[in-house]
């Protein structure tokens, strides 16, 4: 079986495959022979701890290896045990730190087994007492361990012993830290040598820059996409999928798959930074107590100049977060911020920046819902500018019922809305959502009428808009068309005069539409016919130049045939059912009235109105309109004593 076939069918990583391939172990027989000869693979170039474990486990499978051979007692030299007893406090702390780092890299089974065996105490003194100085210790003493776990634990303790031997020769604290970091990095990433200046700098930024260069954080093909398809380096725009696919000669779908995998593994691949001693607070003038860290242009420049790196503010934010994940939460979607934007995700805010917020604040305030709500509001159609008191608005997103935390949240929320949405809080502490729609022609007209304050003709409206907003309107006809389509604007007959609909209720004597519209509205509310003179009075409230004859002619000629005219000048609506004697007045009632007056030569008007009101069974008010109409038509006359004659 070739090593390539083993890679595709067995549980070995691409790193282990490369170790075999680069050291001429081309098939299974060669791998097994090497193991028989050396009982290890860590003597191979670029073979780290994990690759050694994988290849050893592979050999055990095919050799039917007796795990008892690996269960031999650890027998460190007595000199080593004495060395541990004589360690300085600093040396002990460095060794304990090394143990903690490597214990976290064990498999869950191995870590649980050794932690249980040591009663949760993985300090060097306890390990020395329980294991290293215990002649009777055997790996088989640990419960629930198999051959593979025994191998992993043996490597774990061998690395501790090797590190102790190195620590013994170093006294200086910084040199001890460098030593620990070297062991840790070399084992984690299977790197045979790391430049001293990288380790001595104690810089997470320099270290990551070196590891990216060595294709250690991601494998070679992933690393190409990582460096070129994400915002990692300044002055190097991230490539989109199609550009990346063309450069690597692979499909766009494959690029998307690799890119997705990189994002999924990014933070786990950078978690080693937690174990690097880098005093970022002192180096970059950060306040250890500050609640929010934003890597702005100045801070990013300082980080890059200090470390001779060229990382973007976005990537430096991720590195700082990976170094202190137990203290801060990273706000901002990694996919949004690190990748070039070709489209926006729906239903949520698409982030432009990263923000490191103290974990305590994220327990109190829902920052994600806060920015999502802002995004939703700003992307909605805003017809009119509106605002909220900012503190009151923030109270919608607190996670506990305690509004006293709002002043604590406010400065950070204000920075986020400024950087993400370019919003500011006004002098009255309001957050303002400005109109985002194009101003319509009708709105200019409404504003003009508001200034004019009275019904105005189209010429006056046009001139005022041109004065305040030059070249807004093409011509008067365009304005006329807009006015006639706008429900907030009323017109007055055919005079090209316009006003605001609200004036009908706010001002006396204003009603839009034609005379016919005014009469139609008036009759709609009546359950009986109305005399033409009463209609004239209603029309005269809004239009002065008209009379009963004109109105009657107008109604008769209505193309929609909406009106019905009864005898003696009473008017109703077609389609309406009236139960009134006004609908059946005699056609020649006028002649009867004039004859009655003629017989009496001269008679008081009120007496006539009362007489015929009773005779016809109608109201005195309606009878008055009938008499008034006869006077208007000059069939009868009235003197200043209110007497009627012919």
Image: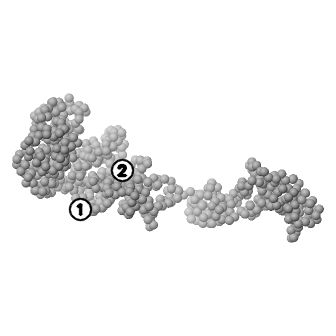
Pointer 2: residues within 10 angstroms few (<14), some, or many (20+)?
Answer: some
Disc 2/disc 1 C-alpha distance (Å): 28 Å
Question: Could you tell whether 100 is left or right of 293 in the image?
Answer: left
Answer left or right for 250 relative to 11: right
**Is residue 107 something one can see in this rendering?**
no
Q: Determine contact: label 2, label 1, CB under 8 Å.
A: no
Instruction: Assign the N terminus to one quadrant of the image.
Output: top left
Category of crowding for the residue at label 1, using alpha-carbon neighbours closer than 10 angstroms: few (below 14), some (14–19), many (at least 20): few
At horizontal 18% and vertical 34% (from top left) the residue drawn is 58
Dot 2 lies on which element?
loop
Q: Determine the residue located farthest toward the top in the rendered image.
A: 1
> Residue visible at 5% across and 45% down?
77
Residue 600 place in picture, x, y as percent: 94, 64
Q: Residue 139: image x %, image y %?
A: 13, 40
Which mark is drawn over residue 645? none
Residue at (15, 50) in percent of width and height: 123
State the image coordinates of residue 186 (x, y, percent, origin top left): 17, 46
The x and y percentages for residue 99 are: 16, 49
Q: Which mark is residue 282?
A: 1
Judged from the image, the secondary structure of the residue bearing numbered disc 1 is helix
Q: Is residue 490 left or right of residue 562?
A: left
Does 168 appear above or below 51? below
Q: Determine whether, in the image, residue 401 is placed left or right of residue 304.
A: right
- Quarter of image, res 50: top left
Residue 6 in sight in this render: yes
Q: Which mark is residue 333?
A: 2
* Sequence-earlier tag: 2 or 1: 1
Where is the C terminus found, in terms of image quarters?
A: bottom right
Quarter where residue 39 is shown: top left
């Amino acid at each position: 079986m070739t090593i390539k076939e083993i890679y595709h069918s067995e549980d070995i990583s691409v790193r282990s495959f490369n170790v075999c391939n680069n050291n001429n172990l081309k098939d299974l027989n060669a791998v097994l022979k090497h193991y028989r000869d050396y009982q290890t693979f860590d003597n191979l170039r670029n073979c780290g701890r994990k690759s050694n474990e994988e290849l050893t486990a592979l050999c055990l499978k095919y050799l039917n290896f007796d795990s008892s051979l690996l269960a031999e007692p650890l027998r460190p030299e007595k000199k080593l045990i004495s060395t541990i007893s004589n360690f300085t406090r600093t040396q002990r702390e460095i060794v304990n730190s090394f143990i903690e780092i490597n214990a976290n890299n064990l498999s869950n089974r191995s870590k649980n087994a050794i932690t249980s065996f040591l009663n949760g105490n993985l300090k060097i003194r306890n390990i020395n007492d329980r294991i290293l100085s215990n002649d009777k210790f055997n790996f088989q003493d640990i419960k629930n361990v198999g051959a593979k776990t025994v191998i992993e634990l043996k490597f774990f303790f061998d690395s501790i012993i090797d590190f102790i031997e190195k620590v013994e020769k170093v006294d200086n604290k910084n040199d001890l830290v460098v030593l620990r970091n070297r062991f840790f990095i070399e084992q984690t990433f299977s790197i045979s040598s790391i430049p001293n200046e990288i380790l001595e700098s104690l810089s997470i930024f320099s270290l990551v820059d070196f590891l990216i260069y060595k294709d250690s954080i991601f494998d070679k093909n992933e690393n190409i996409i990582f460096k070129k398809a994400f915002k990692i380096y300044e002055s190097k725009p991230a490539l989109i999928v199609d550009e990346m696919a063309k450069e690597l000669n692979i499909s766009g779908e494959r690029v998307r798959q690799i890119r997705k995998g990189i994002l999924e593994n990014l933070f786990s691949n950078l978690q080693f930074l937690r174990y690097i001693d880098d005093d970022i607070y002192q180096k970059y003038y950060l306040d250890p107590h500050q609640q929010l860290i934003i890597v702005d242009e100045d801070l990013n420049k300082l980080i890059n100049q200090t470390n001779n790196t060229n990382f973007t503010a976005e990537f430096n934010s991720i590195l700082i977060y990976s170094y202190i994940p137990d203290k801060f939460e990273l706000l901002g979607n990694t996919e949004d911020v690190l990748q070039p934007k070709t489209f926006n995700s729906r239903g949520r805010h698409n982030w432009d920046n990263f923000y490191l917020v103290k974990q305590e604040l994220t327990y109190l305030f829902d920052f994600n819902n806060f920015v999502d709500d802002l995004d939703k509001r700003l992307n909605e159609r805003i017809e009119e500018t509106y605002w909220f008191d900012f503190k009151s608005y923030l109270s919608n997103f607190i996670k506990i019922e305690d509004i006293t935390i709002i002043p604590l949240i406010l400065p950070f929320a204000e920075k986020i809305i400024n950087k993400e949405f370019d919003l500011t809080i006004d002098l009255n502490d309001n957050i303002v959502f400005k109109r985002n729609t194009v101003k319509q022609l009708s709105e200019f007209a409404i504003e003009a009428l508001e200034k004019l304050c009275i019904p105005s003709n189209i010429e006056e409206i046009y001139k005022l808009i041109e004065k305040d907003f030059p070249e807004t309107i093409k011509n008067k006809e365009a304005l006329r068309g807009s006015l006639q389509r706008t429900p907030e604007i009323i017109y007055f007959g055919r005079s090209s005069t316009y006003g605001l609909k609200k004036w009908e209720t706010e001002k006396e004597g204003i009603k839009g539409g034609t005379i016919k519209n005014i009469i139609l509205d008036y009759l709609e509310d009546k359950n009986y016919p109305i005399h033409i003179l009463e209609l004239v009075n209603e029309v005269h409230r809004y239009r002065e130049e008209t009379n009963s004859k004109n109105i009657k002619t107008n109604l008769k000629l209505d193309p929609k045939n909406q009106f019905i005219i009864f005898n003696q000048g009473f008017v109703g609506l077609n389609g309406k059912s009236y139960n009134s004697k006004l609908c059946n007045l005699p056609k020649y009632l006028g002649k009867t009235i004039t004859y009655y007056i003629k017989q009496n030569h001269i008679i008081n008007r009120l007496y006539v109105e009362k007489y015929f009101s009773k005779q016809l069974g109608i109201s005195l008010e309606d009878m008055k309109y009938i008499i008034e109409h006869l006077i208007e038509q000059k069939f009868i006359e009235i003197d200043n004593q209110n007497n009627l004659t012919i």
